[in-house]
Image (spheres, coloured by chain):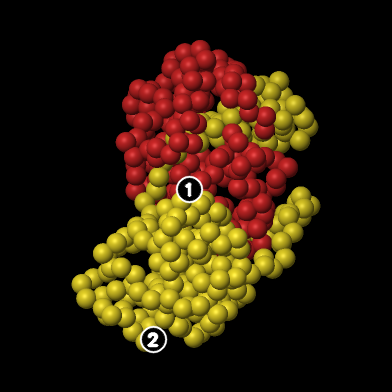
Chain colours: A red, B yellow
Amino acid sequence: MREVVHIGRNPSVEPDLQELVGRVALGDEEAFASVYDNVVSPVLGVVRAVLRDQAQSEEVAQEVLVEVWRTAPRYRPDRGTAINWILTLAHRRAIDRVRSVEATAARDHRAAVMDHMPEYDEVSEQVEARIEREQVRRCLRTLTELQRQAVTLAYYRGLTYRQVAEALTLPLGTVKTRLRDGLIRLRDCLGVTA
Amino acid sequence: MTTADLHWMTGAYALHALSDDEREAFERHLPDCEPCEREATELRATAARLGLAVSMTPRTAMREHVLRRINAVRQDTPDAGSAARPQRAGARAGLISRWALAACMAAVAALGGTAVWQHERAESALEQARRAEQGAGGIATVLAAPDAAARSAALGDGATGTVVVSQDLDRAVFVVSGMERPTRGKVYQLWFADGTAMRSAGLMDPERGDQTVLLRGPVDGASGMGITVEPAGGSRQPTSPPLALMNLPA
């Protein structure tokens, strides 16, 4: 029986991911299996959004999860929640992969400009995931067009702000500030505290 | 890049949209700028929400790959001065010693069986099973027992099993879903495990992937249970490595 975790919205019923990661840090493999069940879907989703290739995404997602196991003893709860730590790592590793590939082959950024939030047919239709997606969509709509394009190109396509500037033909400074004020607006809409 | 520029970088930083050089410059700046650090943390948490919104269910085989891989990966040592981590919560009551279980699982892995991973939160399965089986004689009695305790495990290939034990009644029930049919002429046989000794606890219905079975005979202090594939009619002792071994709940 897989556990269903309510990440970020309903802390009172959330199996404590934080505590599980603490146990993983002590080498507890059972706790790691629970962490895996709780985070694998968003980890794969993030990586797939950036990489788009299914086989590569699975490979990178697995590396991320193994890295969670390896580096759990270094996780610092005072620097953010466990889910944020794990998803930040997933996004980082996906981007590392994209940029290492880019070093040898130029990527087609025009294709990347086409759209924002990825749609997958295989997306998990668990209620939690659907609610989360709807909420993020709703909040993304509160951003200006430029903010939304800049933020989604950077996050879901893994572009640097320079590449975003190029793709949207905007000055660098404008993109930097759009990324910041876009995320701030999103933060306030989603009620993110840290 | 000036310090003033760095203040505007929190968004790009949180989205991993800086070049390596810029990121390093920003991170060097962070300890000197408490508001930047706080904003960066919040915006990173916001970016994580963008990630949660694109959850995607992986293939079930991935779980086993990852759980197998970590066996061979040594963990880092904590950073000096890292925040206190939660204390190990003592030996959790009722668990077979972790070492005994680890030894069993190592044996299973060596035999090519599927290792079973314990999950602690089996209450919802217990509730489901209670509802589903109300009125079904011995099964219902066990599930409704005030001391009934449950433990769930993934059995591989998407199947899950939950064992419910009432120590007062000295009986156990096994609830399984998503089991593949055994090959023709074979059955799944259930066993109580006492250390290395296995005692037959009856057969499952080979036609049903989802079923609830009252384990045959008393629990009688058994520490775990296992499932093997046996010739139709069952065997006196297991003749194949277990598909799964799980310890019984407290």
Q: Is residue A97 left or right of residue B77?
A: left
Q: Which residue is mark 2?
A: B237
Q: Is residue B36 left or right of residue B122?
A: right
Q: Is residue B13 left or right of residue B35?
A: left
Location of residue A110 (image quadrant): top left
Q: CA distance from mark 1 to mark 2?
A: 38 Å
Give the mark count.
2
- Give percent across and percent down for residue A25: 65, 58
Between B139 and A19, the residue placed more toward the observer is B139
Between A73 and B12, the residue placed more toward the observer is A73
Residue at the spot x=34%, y=35% of the render?
A: A120
Q: Secondary structure at mark 2?
A: loop
Q: Is residue A191 above or below residue B212?
A: above
Q: Is residue A37 above or below residue B230?
A: above
- Furthest toward the top, the residue is A144
Residue at the spot x=37%, y=23% of the render?
A: A115
Q: Secondary structure at mark 1?
A: helix
Q: Amino acid at mark 2?
A: Gln
Q: Which residue is mark 1?
A: A40
Q: Quadrant of the C terminus of chain A?
A: top right
- Give percent across and percent down for residue A91: 51, 39
Q: Amino acid at mark 1?
A: Val
Residue at the spot x=57%, y=58% of the render?
A: B120
Residue at the spot x=76%, y=35% of the render?
A: B31
Circle 1 chain: A
Which class describes the residues within 10 Å of circle 2: few (<14), some (14-19), or many (20+)?
some
**Which circle, 1 or 2, is nearer the viewer?**
2
Circle 2 chain: B
